[in-house]
Image: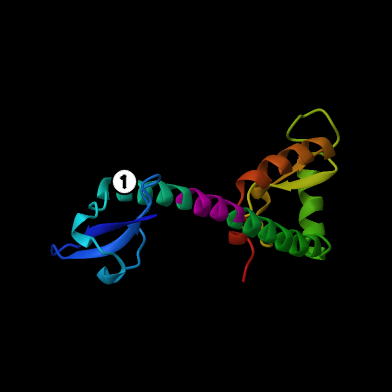
């Protein structure tokens, strides 16, 4: 860092330090009495200072972007954990057991995904009516199809919107 003359927006000159290697211009102002030859100092290179700020801003933007992605992933995982806890409790209720039995009977215990295997599970097409599902929102599936469908859904569904506060 070397001392430079910095001209503010109204044209007044101040003493600052600037790195000529990267362009960084310190935010501190220094007393002109720190140098013997203020008037012979080079002017601050504002193009370099702006380039440094821009590159620094881009780096910070990337850091904030990565942080935000991690925060969103964490929130999604937390929402999924909370949903799975509540959903597991719901699957033990008599209300769910009755719906499940009606859907399996309606579909003749045939997996509606592959139409080949015996259906042993019931899948929610959506969670729009979760805990109050009309039967058309439920479908009979075999274990392997249910696993595949569930994996695809977990990537797409925002479970924080499913859970009732």
Q: Residue at (68%, 61%) from the top-left corner?
A: 78
The vertical placement of 154 against 33, above or below, is above
- Element under label 1? helix
* Image quarter (top left, top right, bottom left or bottom right) of the N terminus: bottom left
Residue 132 on the magenta segment: no
Q: Residue at (75%, 60%) from the top-left corner?
A: 87
**Residue 104 in which image quadrant:** top right
All told, the count of numbered labels is: 1
The vertical placement of 130 against 153, above or below, is below
What is the span of residues highlighted in magenta in the rendered image?
Answer: 61-70
The picture places residue 22, in percent across and down from the top left corner, at 40, 46
Q: Residue furthest left?
A: 10
Left or right: residue 21 versus residue 123 is left
Q: Residue furthest front?
A: 36
Residue at which label 1 appears: 48
Mark 1 closeness class: few <14, some 14–19, many ≥20 residues within 10 Å: some
């Amino acid at each position: 860092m070397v001392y430079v003359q910095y001209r503010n927006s109204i044209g007044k000159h101040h003493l600052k330090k600037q790195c000529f290697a990267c362009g960084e211009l310190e935010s501190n102002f220094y007393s002109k009495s720190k140098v013997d030859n203020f008037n012979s100092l080079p002017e601050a290179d504002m193009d370099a200072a702006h380039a440094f700020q821009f590159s620094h801003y881009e780096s910070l933007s990337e850091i904030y972007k990565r942080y935000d992605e991690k925060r969103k992933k964490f929130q999604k995982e937390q929402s999924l954990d909370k949903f799975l806890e509540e959903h597991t409790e719901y699957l033990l209720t008599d209300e769910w057991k009755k719906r499940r039995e009606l859907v399996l009977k309606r579909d003749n215990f045939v997996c509606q995904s592959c139409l080949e295997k015996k259906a042993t599970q019931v899948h929610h097409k959506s969670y729009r009516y979760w805990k109050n599902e009309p039967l058309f929102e439920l479908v009979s599936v075999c274990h392997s199809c249910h696993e595949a469908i569930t994996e695809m859904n977990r990537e797409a569904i925002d479970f924080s919107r499913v859970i009732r506060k």
